[in-house]
């Protein structure tokens, strides 16, 4: 099985190397036969090849069985016409990774920001919405009408809405069987009207799953006040991006926030946080988010390919991560511990092998 690492920018190379250490441990334990490859993207690729995502890099990513994407500094890239593509957005769109699955849960030994104990997961539609780099067939979804007037367009389709709703309800069947659709249908009556109609259509096929709806502003308030009331949240791209960061920080730290971008045939692990160039190269970055994302990726692969050993390895990685984080003495500095990036990864790898 070929797993391709795309290290990215800033702390990306450090946390992808840490994640590789943990995956190597899982491979040794279960004999999974991983074949690791590395694909240059980001500033390194821009300097060498004139693009942050060269076509050869995309072709290599498409040929892999699974991807692990490090953070990228896309806000600092040059314009698109000068080679500054956002690798994350490009890969999500071009590989049709339509489901961004982002869990947020509290952990033993690490208090949540509100004191509440909760375990929820957000299913975020990943290929359209207000995001200007993926709502048009060609060109951006933003326009500069005059020097003082700008426009942004939002694309919501039946196909995308139905399949993210289907993914959310299927996920809920393995959990506590509740789905909340988050929207702004009181203002975005046409686009969120279509999204909600699709969610209701799918809900009708899952009579064993409780279904409700919340306006985005109310959902933010409820997430702070009673996060334990949520099980699965399904929502559109921008709302999911915002809600998932809020939920992860409430659970204890965005540095622990795992995620996977899933399509029908391929998936990509990706940390929720950014590239943190200010701490790059100092061996202090917390790699937990990407390590957890890799665990989710193996679980997804195991289910898709009907390979229980892959799924078991993914579950073991996440359990090992929980055990290491639960001990204040084996955390990284952002969580009050003393371990550096490499040492933390080695502790998690050792816990996998236990």
Image (cartoon, helix red, strand yellow):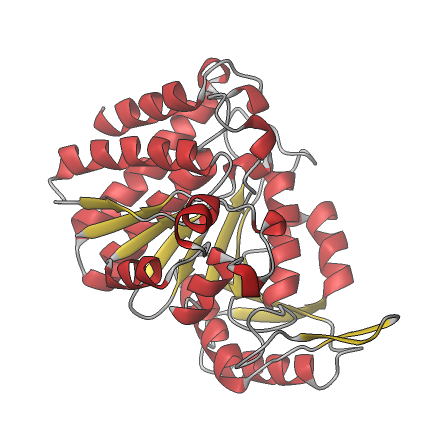
The residue shown at (60%, 80%) is: 156
The residue shown at (58%, 18%) is: 336
Position of residue 132 in the picture relative to residue 286 (left or right): right
Is residue 208 or residue 294 the one in the foreground? 294
The residue shown at (29%, 64%) is: 59
Position of residue 10 in the picture relative to residue 310 (left or right): right
Is the C terminus in the top left, top right, bottom left or bottom right quadrant? top left
Task: Find residue 43 and report its horizontal and vertical position in percent.
Answer: 48, 45
Asked if residue 85 can be seen in this view, the reply is no
- Residue 315 location, quadrant: top left
Asked if residue 327 can be seen in this view, the reply is yes
- Number of marks present in the image shown: 0
Say above or below: 290 vs 65.
above
Task: Find residue 238 and report its horizontal and vertical position in percent.
Answer: 64, 63
The residue shown at (62%, 50%) is: 75
Say above or below: 25 vs 76.
above
Is residue 214 or residue 81 the one in the foreground? 81
Task: Find residue 243 and report its horizontal and vertical position in percent.
Answer: 65, 55
Position of residue 297 in the picture relative to residue 81 (left or right): left
- Residue 106 location, quadrant: top right
Say above or below: 18 vs 35.
above
- Residue 346 location, quadrant: top left
Task: Find residue 295 and report its horizontal and vertical position in percent.
Answer: 34, 44
Is residue 68 or residue 336 the one in the foreground? 68
């Amino acid at each position: 099985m070929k797993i391709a690492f795309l290290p990215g920018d800033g702390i990306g190379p450090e946390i992808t190397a840490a994640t590789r250490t943990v995956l190597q441990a899982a491979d040794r334990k279960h004999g999974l036969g991983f074949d690791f490859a590395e694909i240059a993207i980001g500033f390194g690729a821009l300097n060498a090849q004139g693009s942050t995502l060269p076509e050869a890099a995309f072709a290599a990513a498409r040929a892999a069985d699974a991807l692990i994407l490090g953070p990228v500094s896309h806000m600092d890239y040059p314009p698109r016409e000068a080679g500054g593509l956002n690798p994350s957005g490009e890969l999500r769109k071009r590989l049709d990774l339509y489901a961004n699955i982002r869990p947020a849960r509290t952990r033993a030994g690490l208090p949540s920001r509100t004191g509440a104990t909760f375990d929820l997961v957000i299913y975020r539609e990943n290929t359209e919405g207000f995001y200007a780099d993926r709502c048009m067939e060609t060109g951006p979804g933003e326009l500069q009408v005059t020097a003082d007037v700008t426009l942004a367009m939002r694309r919501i389709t039946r196909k995308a809405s139905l399949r993210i709703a289907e993914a959310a309800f299927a996920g809920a069947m393995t959990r506590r069987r509740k789905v909340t659709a988050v929207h702004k249908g009181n203002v975005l009556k046409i686009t969120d009207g279509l999204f909600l109609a699709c969610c209701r259509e799918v809900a009708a096929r899952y009579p064993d799953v409780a279904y409700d709806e919340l306006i985005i502003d109310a959902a933010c308030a409820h997430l702070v006040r009673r996060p334990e009331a949520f099980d699965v949240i399904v929502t559109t791209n921008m709302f999911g991006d915002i809600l998932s960061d809020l939920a992860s920080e409430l659970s204890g730290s965005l540095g622990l926030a795992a995620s996977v971008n899933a399509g029908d045939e391929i998936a990509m692990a990706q940390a929720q946080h950014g590239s943190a160039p200010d701490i790059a190269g100092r061996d202090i970055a917390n790699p937990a988010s990407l390590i957890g994302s890799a665990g989710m990726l193996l679980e997804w692969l195991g289910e898709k390919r009907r390979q229980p050993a892959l799924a078991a390895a993914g579950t073991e990685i996440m359990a090992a991560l929980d055990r290491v984080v639960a001990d204040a003495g084996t955390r990284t500095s952002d969580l009050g511990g003393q371990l550096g990036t490499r040492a933390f990864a080695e502790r998690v790898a050792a816990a996998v092998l236990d």
